């Protein structure tokens, strides 16, 4: 079966009858599923059983239109728009300590895939308003996911909206669309009957882009939803979760009765990048892959896939979506900008 139907799940009557508190959110019924995978990258292992309670999730990633409304109402300044503090980046070259963000800049030829600097460039002036650098804009991209979002930016938006960021377990459960243990969010084939189900890289990454229609991000509902009616959980942009990074999942408990409920990730003090011990910037879990994921380089266009991202890092392929827990969403609390700060 190329595109499987979601598994039948029992939902409490109260949740089944509760109307969506927001037309742009979807109720996820909750349940027990096998999280992670033993068949791909080591950080996805071991596959293990966990349980999550019902929750609401945004139908799509947060768009440029939605993020603009947040900024207009709060005067919020994103991390990429603030000059870095030299104290946070020991050894950094002074001329690099300017506001900006990482932008995908494809080379014109094949390169060593072990050297990401061949296709990533830190561009001064790149941010959510100018995703490809100072002379770019988001004109015509209102329905595309907002990008160049650092973790604190996603967290600030969620607080303003009266929502939260999803845990890794919630995110993965929602992404699977009811298909427990399926390879992809839509079944076990990447392109069932030749149909592309998500905005992922086509061709040889990073120099050959064979996409028809979308050179970078795509509108948030350009591809079919999964079994829960949620769009873009796979591809388009990576999405922040609330969990600290851990290099591996916890294995199943010896007793079947001990399935973790609403688990959280690792510890903040264990999330630092061991390859750069002089930089003490914690990392969160990203999920979902992006339009840059390709069979020849990054096969992370799957619900089980995960990636570590420093909380201060923003790029042209990272966005987010929000969740809400309980029967309804409370009115959004007033948001007070914290000002230009580089605190992590």
Image (cartoon, helix red, strand yellow):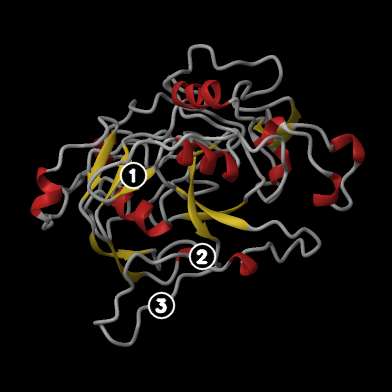
**Disc number lying in front (2 or 1):** 2
* Mark-to-mark CA distance, 3 and 2: 12 Å
Closest to the observer, 5 or 281 = 281
Q: Residues within 10 Å of mark 3 (few under 14, many from 20)?
A: few
Q: Relative to the observer, which residue lies in front, 308 or 188?
A: 308
Q: Residue 85 at what x, y percent from top left?
A: 82, 43
Which SS class for mark 1?
Answer: loop
Give the residue displayed 9% in from the left and 44% down from the top: 17
Query: Mark 1 vs mark 3: which is more N-terminal?
Result: 1
Spatial separation of the CA atoms under disc 2 and disc 1: 21 Å
As drawn, 191 above or below 246: above
Which numbered dot is residue 251?
3
Up/down of 175 relative to 73, above or below: below
> Mark 2 highlights which residue?
43
Q: Position of residue 158 (x, y in %)?
A: 46, 40
In what element is the residue under mark 3? loop
Question: Where's residue 92, x and y in %?
Answer: 87, 46
Residue 290 visible, this orientation: no
Occupied quadrant, residue 127: top right
Marks 1/3: CA distance?
27 Å
**Residue 60 visible at all:** yes
Instruction: Tally the numbered discs.
Output: 3
The picture places residue 79, in percent across and down from the top left corner, at 67, 37
Q: Which mark is residue 190?
A: 1
């Amino acid at each position: 079966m190329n595109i499987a139907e979601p598994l039948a799940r029992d939902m409490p009557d109260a949740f089944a009858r509760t109307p969506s508190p927001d037309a742009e959110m979807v109720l996820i019924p909750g349940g027990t599923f096998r999280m992670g995978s033993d068949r791909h990258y080591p950080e996805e292992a071991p596959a293990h059983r966990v349980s999550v309670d019902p929750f609401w999730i945004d139908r799509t990633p947060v768009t440029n239109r939605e993020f603009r409304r947040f900024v207009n109402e709060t005067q919020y300044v994103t991390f990429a728009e603030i000059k870095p503090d030299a104290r946070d980046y020991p050894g950094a070259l002074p001329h690099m300590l300017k506001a900006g963000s990482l932008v995908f800049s494809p080379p014109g030829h094949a390169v060593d895939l072990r050297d990401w600097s061949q296709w990533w460039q830190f561009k001064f002036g790149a941010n959510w308003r100018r995703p490809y650098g100072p002379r770019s804009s988001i004109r015509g991209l209102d329905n595309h996911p907002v990008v160049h979002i650092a973790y604190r930016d996603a967290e600030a938006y969620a607080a303003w909206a009266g929502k939260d960021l999803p845990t890794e377990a919630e995110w993965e459960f929602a992404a699977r669309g009811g298909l427990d243990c399926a390879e992809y969010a839509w079944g076990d084939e990447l392109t069932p009957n030749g149909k592309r189900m998500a905005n992922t890289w086509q061709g040889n990454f990073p120099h050959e882009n064979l996409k028809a229609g979308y050179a970078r991000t795509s509108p948030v509902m350009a591809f079919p939803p999964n079994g829960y009616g949620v769009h873009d959980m796979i591809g388009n942009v990576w999405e922040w979760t609330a969990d600290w990074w851990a290099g591996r999942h916890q294995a199943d408990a010896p007793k079947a009765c001990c399935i973790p409920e609403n688990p959280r990730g690792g510890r903040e003090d264990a999330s630092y990048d061991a390859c750069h011990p002089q930089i003490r910037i914690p990392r969160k879990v990203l999920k979902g892959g992006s339009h840059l994921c390709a069979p020849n380089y990054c096969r992370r266009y799957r619900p089980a896939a995960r990636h570590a991202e420093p909380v201060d890092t923003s790029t042209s392929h990272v966005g987010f979506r929000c969740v809400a827990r309980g029967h309804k969403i409370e009115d959004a609390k007033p948001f007070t900008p914290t000002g230009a700060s580089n605190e992590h």
